[in-house]
Amino acid sequence: MKKIAVIGSGTMGNGIAHSFAQYGFDVALIDINVGALQRAMQTITVNLDKQVKKGTIDDQLKIDTLNRIIIYTDLNEAVKEADLVVEAATENQEIKLNLFKQLSNICSDDTILASNTSSISITLIASVTKNPANVIGMHFMNPVPLMKLVEVIKGKQTSVATTKTIMQLSNQLGKIPVEVNDAPGFVANRILMPMINEAIYTLYENVSGVEEIDTVMKLGMAHPMGPLQLADFIGLDVCLAILNVLYTGFNNEKYTPCPLLIDMVSNKDLGVKTGSGFYKYTQGSKELVVSARFSKT
């Protein structure tokens, strides 16, 4: 496996492209928006510079990594020779199903089609393809170049060979893959999102403020980041989309999204990517300045 195509140049897509290229794979990074692709390459360059500064890679590996990534707006051209396609588009079921239907018609029968979905059924995604045995979930964590975990999600028809290939490939990227079966939210988000939702309810019901809630979880539960700041980091729109998948998939009231989360998404307070979520994010001289938007009243 040498040629990798990554669909979507946002936070997850550019991180996945970065990781594959850093470990010697030729990468086609695909997006319909040229500006988004240019911003993605800028982000990858900045992140590589940080790695050089920390001494985890050298200047030559930075140059080689960037040279291995080619950007495309033409899906057909980008994926036609790919050994693996990793879809990292927005967490929208209709968009993903349409993409996989297209990929099934474009790619060879041997190409593995993987989704970085946080919650959408791999079995459902595979059902629109010609070769469901070659469809699998490859759920990276953010930030991709730093986080070790990859959830490898098997659909009902995913073959043993496909699963074995993706487990081995994840190891080649310096990751630790964990094999899980297909279910709403898989493992990570089935556990994480109810916790985040409960933290939002705790704020909504005025039990405590943003910083106080996050401090309790950081100091009391040894979490490196509080659930509200983590929600901002993930994107509140993504959190809401995952909770909706859990609510629909399990038909259980306990997954009902908090009204405050729904309101914030409606108001485009989506977290770090919009500069405002449970915290405000402003660019200082060298780093992001973070301040809570909600205090205990």
Image (tube, rainbow, N blue to C red):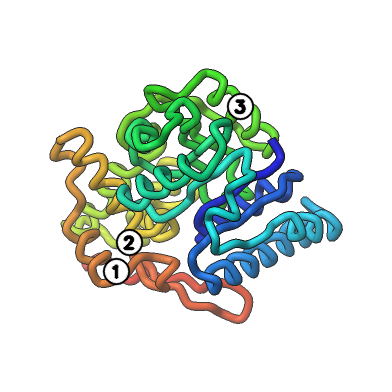
Q: Is residue 286 above or below residue 28?
A: below
- Position of residue 72 measured from the top left corner of the image (x, y, whole percent): 59, 62
- Tell me whether the residue at label 1 lies in contact with that at label 2, contact meaning CB atoms closer than 8 angstroms: yes
- Position of residue 202 measured from the top left corner of the image (x, y, whole percent): 23, 53
Q: Nearer the viewer, residue 221 or 37?
A: 37
Q: Nearer the viewer, residue 224 or 76?
A: 76
Using a 10 Å C-alpha cutoff, classify the residue at mark 1 as few (fewer than 14 neighbours), some (14 to 19) or many (20 or more): some
Q: Residue at x 59, y 48 (%)?
A: 5
Residue 284 in which image quadrant:
bottom right
Dot label at residue 294: 1
Q: Say whether residue 190 is visible.
A: no
Dot label at residue 13: none
- Tell me whether the residue at label 3 lies in contact with that at label 2, contact meaning CB atoms closer than 8 angstroms: no
Q: Is residue 35 above or below residue 162?
A: below
Mark 2, residue position: 210
First of labels 3, 1 by sequence position = 3
Of marks 3 and 2, the one in the foreground:
3
Task: Give the amino acid at mark 1.
Answer: Phe
Task: Give the amino acid at mark 2.
Answer: Val
First of labels 1, 2 by sequence position = 2
- Residues at marks 3 and 1, CA–CA distance in whole angstroms: 46 Å
Mark 3, residue position: 165
Q: Residue at x 77, y 59 (%)?
A: 67
First of labels 3, 2 by sequence position = 3
Using a 10 Å C-alpha cutoff, classify the residue at mark 2 as few (fewer than 14 neighbours), some (14 to 19) or many (20 or more): many
